[in-house]
Image (tube, rainbow, N blue to C red):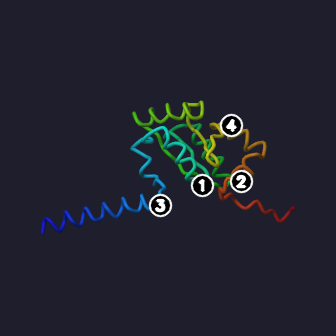
């Protein structure tokens, strides 16, 4: 009976690993560790997996601002919350890739557009909505019956 359990477990493990190899695409869970990403290359892979990704820290007022802007646009980002040693390491990776270590770090269509202040400027100037739409982010309906 013990051997049946171990065979069953190894079958599930083999099946799960086969799916990853079959598609050739990494799953988000393969790229993340608690509080951050596994390696520097994971950031670009995650940014390319989703049309809108925001790296944040809990309690950060700038992160809340960026998320609030996305909410007002009707956009739902993939949020990666950083904390602890892995979060610090991920922020160092972000600096190498984007030139900024700070959060939020907003990626639209696989490219970093900056942090909260850059997102606010793009939102206020009307550049954010077309940028999100071009990346395939579902935004709120801007239909207005009054013209």
Label 2 vs label 1, nearer the camera: 2
- The location of residue 115, given as percent across then percent down, is 62, 37
State if disc 3 and disc 1 touch (CB < 8 Å): no
- The residue singled out by tag 2 in the image is 134
**Image-based side of 8 in relation to 39, left or right:** left
Q: Looking at the image, tell me whether mark 1 or mark 3 is earlier in sequence order.
A: 3
Q: Please tell me how crowded label 2 is: few (under 14), some (14-19), or many (20+) other residues with Cα within 10 Å.
A: few
Q: Looking at the image, tell me whether mark 3 or mark 2 is earlier in sequence order.
A: 3
Which numbered circle lies on residue 118? Answer: 4
Give 5 or 87, whichever is nearer the viewer: 5
Quadrant of the image occupied by residue 145:
bottom right
State how far apart marks 2 and 1 are (Cα).
Answer: 15 Å
Q: Please tell me how crowded label 4 is: few (under 14), some (14-19), or many (20+) other residues with Cα within 10 Å.
A: some
- The residue singled out by tag 1 in the image is 76
Q: Secondary structure at mark 2?
A: helix
Q: Residue 109, relative to residue 10: is it above or below?
A: above
**Image-based side of 126 in relation to 32, left or right:** right
Q: Looking at the image, tell me whether mark 4 or mark 1 is earlier in sequence order.
A: 1
Label 3 vs label 2, nearer the camera: 3
Q: Looking at the image, tell me whether mark 4 or mark 3 is earlier in sequence order.
A: 3
Q: Please tell me how crowded label 1 is: few (under 14), some (14-19), or many (20+) other residues with Cα within 10 Å.
A: some
State how far apart marks 3 and 2 are (Cα).
Answer: 26 Å
Quadrant of the image occupied by residue 101:
top right
């Amino acid at each position: 009976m013990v051997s049946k359990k171990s065979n069953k477990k190894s079958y599930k493990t083999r099946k799960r690993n086969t799916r990853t190899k079959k598609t050739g695409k990494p799953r988000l869970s393969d790229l993340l560790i608690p509080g951050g990403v596994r390696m520097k290359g994971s950031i670009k892979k995650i940014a390319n997996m989703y049309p809108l990704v925001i790296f944040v820290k809990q309690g950060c007022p700038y992160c809340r601002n960026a998320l609030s802007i996305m909410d007002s646009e009707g956009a739902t980002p993939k949020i990666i919350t950083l904390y602890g040693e892995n979060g610090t390491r991920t922020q160092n990776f972000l600096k190498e890739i984007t030139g900024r270590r700070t959060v939020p770090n907003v990626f639209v269509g696989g490219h970093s557009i900056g942090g909260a202040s850059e997102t606010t400027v793009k939102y206020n100037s009307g550049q954010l909505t077309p940028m999100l739409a071009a990346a395939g982010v579902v935004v709120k309906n801007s239909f207005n019956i009054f013209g």
